[in-house]
Image (cartoon, rainbow, N blue to C red):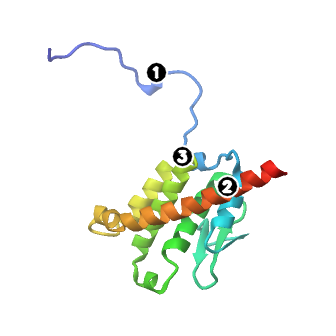
């Protein structure tokens, strides 16, 4: 049957109650992470370069320095934000740490790094989907062939995510076995 029927509708001005807080995607990254210390230690050990904290005032949450072979994370971030940023920068250190990387456009590097970070964050249960997908879409928009970037980079993304995940899991197992011995 096709047609119309009468239903009650309300305008927001006709409702009562306390205002609901607006949630932004950032609210999800401001949460604590169960097992943070253990996971952060494993990431630090699995990282292809050294990891340290410092005051970062350029608006970013951190960066990978190819010249210094280090990842610098912004001091004072939430646990979830720290892990998500470290995943992203570890991906840069894994994928873009050679001479050939100088020739790769920045938007491709960012799409690749955040795609790897998304895979790792999702694996470890971080609520990152909205933030990561928006970041990837933003950088991918710099290219006419938006889906082509992902297609062309997919094997690199998959390989880096797999390598990093293997190293992280190895470090987590080491940590678990050393706790059992102690």
Q: Can you tell which mark lies on residue 172?
A: 2
x, y (%) of residue 47? Answer: 63, 68
Q: Secondary structure at mark 1?
A: helix
Depth order, front residue of 101/139: 101
Tell me the crowding category of disc 2: few under 14, some 14 to 19, or many 20 or more residues within 10 angstroms, Cα based.
many
Towards the viewer: 71 or 174: 174
Left or right relative to 89: residue 56: right
Q: Earlier in the sequence, mark 3 or mark 2?
A: 3
Give residue 12's position: percent from left, percent from top. 45, 27
Secondary element at image label 2 = helix
Q: Nearer the viewer, mark 3 or mark 2?
A: 2
109 to the left or right of 3: right
Residue 133 appears in the rendering: yes
For this rendering, which residue is in front, 166 or 121? Answer: 166
In terms of sequence position, does the residue under pointer 1 or pointer 2 come before the other?
1
Disc 3 crowd rating (10 Å Cα; few below 14, some 14-19, many 20+) is few
SS assignment at label 3: loop
Q: Residue furthest left?
A: 2
Residue 14: image tag: 1
Which mark is first along the chain, 3 or 1?
A: 1
User: Residue sitting at 64 percent across and 83 percent down?
Assistant: 68
Q: Residue 57 location in percent, x, y?
A: 65, 71
Whole-angstrom CA distance, mark 1 to mark 2, is 54 Å
Residue neighbourhood size for the residue with mark 1, other residues' Cα within 10 Å, grouped as few (<14), some (14–19), many (≥20)? few
Distance from label 3 to label 2 (Cα)?
Answer: 32 Å
Which residue does the image show at 14% across and 17% down from the upper left?
2
Mark number, residue 24? 3
Q: Is residue 37 visible?
A: no
Task: Point out the residue furthest to the front here.
Answer: 181
> Where is residue 65, by image quadrant?
bottom right
Q: Residue at x 55, y 53 (%)?
A: 121
In the image, residue 84 lies at what x, y percent? 58, 57
């Amino acid at each position: 049957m096709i047609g119309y029927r009468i239903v009650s509708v309300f305008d927001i001005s006709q409702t009562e109650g306390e205002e609901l807080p607006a949630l932004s995607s950032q609210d999800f990254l401001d949460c604590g992470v169960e097992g943070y210390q253990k996971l952060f230690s494993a990431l630090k050990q699995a990282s292809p370069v050294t990891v340290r904290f410092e005051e970062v005032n350029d608006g970013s949450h951190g960066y990978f320095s190819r010249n210094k072979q280090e990842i610098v994370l912004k001091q004072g971030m939430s646990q979830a934000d720290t892990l998500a940023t470290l995943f992203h920068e570890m991906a840069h250190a894994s994928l873009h740490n050679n001479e050939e990387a100088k020739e790769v456009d920045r938007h491709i590097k960012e799409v690749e790094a955040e795609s790897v970070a998304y895979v790792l964050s999702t694996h470890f249960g971080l609520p990152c989907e909205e933030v990561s997908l928006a970041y990837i879409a933003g950088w991918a928009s710099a290219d006419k062939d938006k889906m082509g970037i992902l297609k062309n980079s997919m094997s690199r993304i998959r390989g880096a995510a797999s390598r990093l995940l293997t190293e992280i899991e190895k470090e987590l197992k080491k940590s678990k076995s050393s706790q059992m011995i102690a």
